[in-house]
């Protein structure tokens, strides 16, 4: 800045006292403008650093060619984090000693490891890979899984129960799946389930150089779950009342809703315990691996309806950040949910999830702008398949994003662990 200072002093007459000629003034004026433009350019890392995330659903990583296309598109859009689904329905899109392989993809050769392959190719491009796990949702077909190792077959007693007595592990599939219930959910209140989930994630973080772990479906499907017999007995031993009596309230036993609040807290703590156990295990393996969760965007609804206390997870530090699933085509609703979240948590702990499958590319770009204006950690697009199915999306996003020199925050750089 010394050149600008010396010039400005001279231009003010401090050093040069003689009046400028027109040609002299023009020369100094042009030089000054050029210097101003050069020195006033703020580096993109300081002014515009953000996470650019992309959710990649499991059917996009079942072959080498598909993985190459994912990484190439991500690189062209300067995506910094791929959230890659490696557990969709109680299965493993990686090499596991105990989790069954995916059903419905018989052409995946034994020699091909989807997770290892995408980590290798993405890291070469400077892109992080966060292993995305569906935690409690374990099956969503009407027919049962074929593999005897699948939890539906091995442990039907591990699954949630509704307040009407519907057991999601034992009821026929066609009586479970509906617009409001995706399928069979494992029960957070069963200790064996918690231990199993921690084991699943531990195997991956131990054997693969993942940069992060991303939790999805880490919630109940709604307030009418989970009345598993073991959960009811735990609650009754502690509080002296059956939670079914609380929610039904047919006997007027809880007119002040005292026990209802206790029940809401109790069922939320079951999920808290799982997330905490996952976090503890990851920290033991490698403290550089970041833990995140895809969450319902309205924090109060997330907790009271779905038992997903993500504000508490951030406050306690058991997750590093969350990705809000703000899949709203209406920009006003999208920004309103961001505003609610920012009243409760640090804006740099939130990545704004955008459901691009529900809107045109121009509206999606507007929501990216809203995320930037709110100062969030970044944004994440759901999902990669929209780009493969919609050429307009590819063209628009490449035009708008491919030339931007936006860098991720410093902590979002691929961390490759050495294998001993």
Image: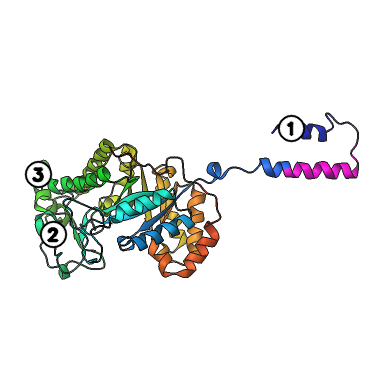
76 or 68, which is in the foreground? 68
Q: Which residue is mark 1?
A: 5
* Secondary structure found at label 2: helix
- Alpha-carbon span between mark 2 and mark 1: 73 Å
- Alpha-carbon span between mark 2 and mark 3: 32 Å
* Secondary structure found at label 1: helix
Q: Residue 199: x, y in percent?
A: 19, 45
How many discs appear?
A: 3
Q: Which residue is mark 2?
A: 152
407 or 417, which is in the foreground? 417
Could you tell whether 106 is left or right of 227 in the image?
right
Observer able to see residue 262: no
Q: Residues within 10 Å of mark 2 (few under 14, many from 20)?
A: many
| Residue 30 located within the stretch drawn in magenta | yes
Q: Which residue is mark 3?
A: 240
* Secondary structure found at label 3: loop
Q: Earlier in the sequence, mark 1 or mark 3?
A: 1
Residue at horizontal 48 percent and vertical 47 percent from the top: 50
Q: Quadrant of the C terminus?
A: top left
Q: Residue 257: x, y in percent?
A: 21, 49
The magenta segment is 18-34
């Amino acid at each position: 800045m010394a050149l600008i200072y010396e010039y400005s002093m001279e231009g003010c007459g401090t050093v040069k006292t003689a009046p400028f000629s027109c040609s002299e003034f023009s020369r100094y004026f042009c030089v000054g403008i050029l210097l101003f433009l050069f020195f006033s350019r703020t580096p993109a890392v300081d002014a515009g650093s953000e996470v650019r995330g992309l959710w990649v659903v499991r059917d996009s990583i079942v072959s080498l060619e598909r993985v190459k296309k994912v990484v190439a598109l991500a690189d062209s859009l300067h995506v910094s984090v791929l959230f890659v689904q490696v557990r969709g329905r109680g299965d493993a899109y990686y090499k596991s000693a105990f989790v069954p392989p995916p059903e419905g993809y018989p052409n995946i050769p034994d020699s091909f490891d989807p997770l290892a392959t995408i980590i290798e190719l993405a890291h070469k491009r400077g892109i992080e890979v966060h292993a995305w796990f569906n935690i409690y949702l374990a099956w969503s077909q009407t027919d049962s899984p074929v593999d005897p190792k699948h939890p539906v077959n091995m442990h039907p007693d591990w699954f949630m129960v509704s307040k009407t007595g519907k057991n999601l592990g034992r009821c026929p599939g066609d009586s479970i799946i509906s617009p409001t219930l995706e399928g069979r959910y494992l029960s957070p209140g069963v200790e064996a389930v918690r231990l199993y989930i921690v084991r699943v994630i531990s195997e991956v973080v131990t054997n693969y150089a993942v940069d992060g772990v991303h939790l999805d479906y880490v919630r109940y499907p709604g307030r009418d779950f989970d009345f598993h017999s073991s959960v009811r007995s735990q609650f009754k031993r502690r509080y002296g009342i059956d939670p079914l009596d609380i929610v039904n309230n047919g006997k007027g036993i809880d007119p002040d809703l005292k026990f209802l609040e206790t029940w809401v807290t109790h069922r939320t703590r079951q999920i808290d315990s799982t997330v905490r156990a996952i976090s503890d295990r990851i920290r033991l393996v490698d403290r550089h691996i970041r833990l995140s969760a895809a969450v319902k965007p309205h924090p109060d609804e997330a907790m009271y309806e779905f038992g997903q206390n993500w504000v508490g997870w951030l406050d306690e530090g058991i997750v590093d950040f969350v990705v809000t699933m703000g899949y709203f085509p209406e920009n006003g609703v999208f920004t309103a949910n961001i505003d609610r979240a920012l009243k409760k948590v640090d804006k740099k702990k939130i990545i704004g999830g955008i459901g691009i499958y529900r809107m045109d590319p121009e509206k999606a770009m507007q929501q990216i702008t809203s995320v930037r204006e709110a100062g969030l950690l970044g944004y994440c697009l759901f999902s990669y398949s929209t780009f493969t199915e919609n050429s307009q999306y590819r063209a628009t996003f490449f035009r708008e994003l491919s030339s931007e020199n936006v860098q991720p925050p410093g902590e979002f750089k691929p961390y490759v662990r050495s294998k001993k």
